[in-house]
């Protein structure tokens, strides 16, 4: 039964209020665990396709109906956080009592104007009712915006002011600006909601790529963002079309940067997801915007670092033998003192490049051989090829090594996504004797000093057959795993003692902080010679939670000595912990 059926008319009874409040106050789930596991960030086109596969084929709800419709979804998604009986509109920031359809105060805004590509409502028109781009809007402001593209306005544009509600809007400069009409006109959304409309349109550009709905089989349009107003104009034909355009793309990218994701968007995303079953990935993972729309897929425009196996490597593998496979295992060797807490081995399938099993590691490499140590890990269920692989991932989620046997593969998910494996060149078969393994042999102190040998009697947790270790490579990764509370509106310091010769040079500092408001946090690194380096400045507009980042620093002094990480909470009423930090040389 539809909860707010009577809300389609102005009369609004006490019982109806209770009914609507119950719908709006549903406990929405945040991003489900594993929802984006198949997102592949190796390049823009691959990420766009894998995100499309995750979010397409959603459940459609009617625009207006006696059953659950977009009125119901939006009155929950855009509920006033200060008054559960009200909604907040997107352009005026006004708070209106919930009365559903047929009122004179607010209506439903298509942030991508329906006239550009999908004007005719019907059961086969999915973008028309897709609530991820629909918002409650003041009726007059919605009419003023009409179907103007989003763009920046100059001083000649007309001002559309905002109301002050929930500690925002209503101030100087907090206004919408507009001029012209149609595809040649302009609508500049006010500062507090620029990112909302930008990410809504970006969602549409990924969700709708043409083709058929995977469940209902109906045709869907290809929606494309552009800076070309002529293409936008060409999308307005009065009928539903196969390809449509909206923009302005470059402006939307900038608005995304200027107005980070906030609680309003997260509530909207959760509420829509609770009904449609899909999410807006650019709210959950804002960094995906850089990859898809700017082709910057590592967050900083540089290619991902090459695997670093200079101080730790895979030293021995067993995956196949005669009869049923037994004692499958992977052995690691490397510099003594490396703590493997938070590291993992990930097994990859050569058929589709996907990971199929993960083994969490623990323990510390002991000083067994001239500063080197070995640890063996049982890894049952390793596939027998062809072209299956194993990736060694450190506690910063960096791939240290990606090896394969019986061929080469390219990983399609996880930390190694987009990477090509290195074939070790030797194999095991169903005829390999029980108790044999594939091993490195030779003389040296790093992976490249050794070569893989055909299967021989295993040497788990010992130097391999024909393997001799010389003086060790110095440890390159140093970690402080002590969890420390970050005091509210104060600072704390965490120390890390490093034993390493020579100058520090370029180092990578990885920080894992859980916190309720990351914008409050600033970070300083102090080297042993007393020189200090700013890693992160505080930014009050950054309302996300945790700080899980790596920072590159050029250090002029020596590596040896005590390093310090200073963590400062610059505002009140927040809590958090420094979970871990490390330095890699």
Image (cartoon, rainbow, N blue to C red):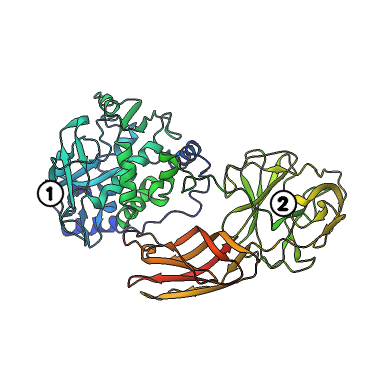
Answer yes or no: do the residues labelled 1 and 2 have beta carbons within 8 Å?
no
Instruction: Examine the rendered structure and indicate whether residue 83 appears above or below residue 73.
Output: below
Q: Which x, y percent locates residue 452?
A: 80, 47
Label number found at residue 10:
1
Q: Which residue is mark 2?
A: 381
Compute the Cα span from label 1 to label 2.
Answer: 64 Å
Instruction: Examine the rendered structure and indicate whether residue 402 appears above or below residue 336.
Output: above
Compare residues 169 and 280 and report the one nearer the observer. 169
Compare residues 343 and 151 and report the one nearer the observer. 151
Taking the spot 49% from the left edge, 47% from the top edge, the residue there is 298
Quarter of the image that includes the C terminus: bottom right
Question: Which mark is in front, 1 or 2?
Answer: 2
Taking the spot 40% from the left edge, 39% from the top edge, the residue there is 293
Neighbours of disc 2 within 10 Å: few (<14), some (14-19), many (20+): some
Taking the spot 12% from the left edge, 49% from the top edge, the residue there is 10
Q: Which x, y percent locates residue 314?
A: 73, 54
């Amino acid at each position: 039964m539809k909860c707010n059926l009577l809300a389609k008319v102005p009369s609004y009874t006490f019982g109806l209020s209770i009914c609507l409040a119950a719908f709006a106050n549903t406990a929405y789930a945040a991003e489900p665990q594993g929802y984006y596991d198949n997102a592949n960030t190796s390049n823009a086109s691959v990420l766009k396709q894998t995100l499309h596969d995750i979010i397409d084929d959603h459940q459609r709800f009617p625009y207006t109906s006696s059953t659950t419709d977009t009125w119901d979804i939006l009155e929950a998604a855009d509920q006033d956080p200060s008054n559960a009986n009200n909604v907040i509109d997107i352009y005026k920031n006004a708070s209106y009592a919930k009365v559903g359809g047929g009122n004179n105060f607010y209506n439903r805004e298509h942030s991508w104007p329906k006239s550009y590509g999908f004007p005719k409502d019907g059961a086969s028109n999915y973008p028309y009712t897709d609530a991820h781009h629909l918002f409650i809007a003041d009726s007059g402001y919605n009419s003023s915006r009409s179907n103007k593209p989003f763009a920046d306005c100059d001083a000649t544009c007309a001002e559309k002011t905002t109301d002050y509600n929930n500690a925002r809007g209503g101030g100087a400069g907090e206004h919408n600006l507009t001029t012209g009409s149609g595809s040649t006109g302009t609508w500049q959304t006010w500062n507090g909601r620029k990112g909302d409309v930008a990410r809504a349109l970006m969602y549409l550009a990924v969700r709708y790529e043409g083709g058929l709905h995977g469940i209902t089989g109906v045709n869907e349009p290809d929606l494309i963002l552009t800076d070309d107003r002529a293409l936008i104009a060409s999308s307005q034909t009065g009928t539903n079309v196969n390809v449509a355009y909206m923009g302005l793309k470059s402006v939307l990218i900038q608005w995304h940067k200027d107005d980070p994701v906030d609680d309003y968007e997260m509530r909207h995303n959760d509420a829509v997801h609770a009904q449609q079953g899909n999410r807006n990935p650019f709210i959950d993972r804002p960094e995906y915007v850089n990859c898809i729309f700017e082709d910057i897929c590592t967050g900083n425009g540089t290619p991902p670092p090459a695997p670093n196996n200079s101080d730790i490597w895979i030293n021995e593998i067993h995956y196949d033998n005669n009869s049923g496979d037994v004692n499958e295992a992977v052995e690691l060797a490397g510099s003594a003192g490396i703590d493997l807490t938070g590291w993992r081995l990930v097994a990859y399938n050569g058929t589709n490049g996907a990971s199929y099993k993960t083994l969490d590691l623990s323990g510390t490499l002991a000083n067994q051989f001239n500063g080197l140590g070995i640890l063996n890990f049982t890894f049952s269920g390793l596939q027998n090829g062809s072209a299956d692989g194993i990736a060694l991932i450190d506690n910063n989620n960096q791939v240290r090594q990606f090896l394969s046997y019986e061929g080469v593969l390219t990983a399609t998910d996880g930390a190694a996504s987009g990477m090509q494996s290195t074939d070790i060149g030797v194999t095991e078969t169903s005829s390999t004797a029980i108790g044999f393994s594939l091993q490195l042999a030779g003389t040296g102190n790093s992976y490249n000093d050794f070569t893989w040998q055909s299967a021989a009697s295993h040497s788990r947790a010992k130097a391999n057959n024909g393997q001799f270790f010389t003086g060790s490579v110095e440890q390159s990764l140093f970690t402080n795993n002590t969890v420390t509370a970050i005091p509210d509106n104060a600072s704390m310091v965490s120390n890390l003692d490093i034993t390493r010769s020579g100058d520090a040079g370029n180092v990578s500092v990885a920080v894992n902080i859980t916190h309720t408001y990351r914008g409050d946090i600033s970070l300083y690194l102090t080297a042993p010679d007393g020189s200090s380096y700013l890693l992160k400045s505080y930014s009050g507009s950054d309302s996300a939670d945790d700080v899980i980042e790596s920072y590159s620093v050029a250090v002029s002094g020596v590596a040896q000595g005590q390093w310090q990480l200073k963590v400062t909470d610059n505002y009140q009423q927040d809590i958090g912990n420094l979970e871990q930090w490390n330095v890699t040389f």
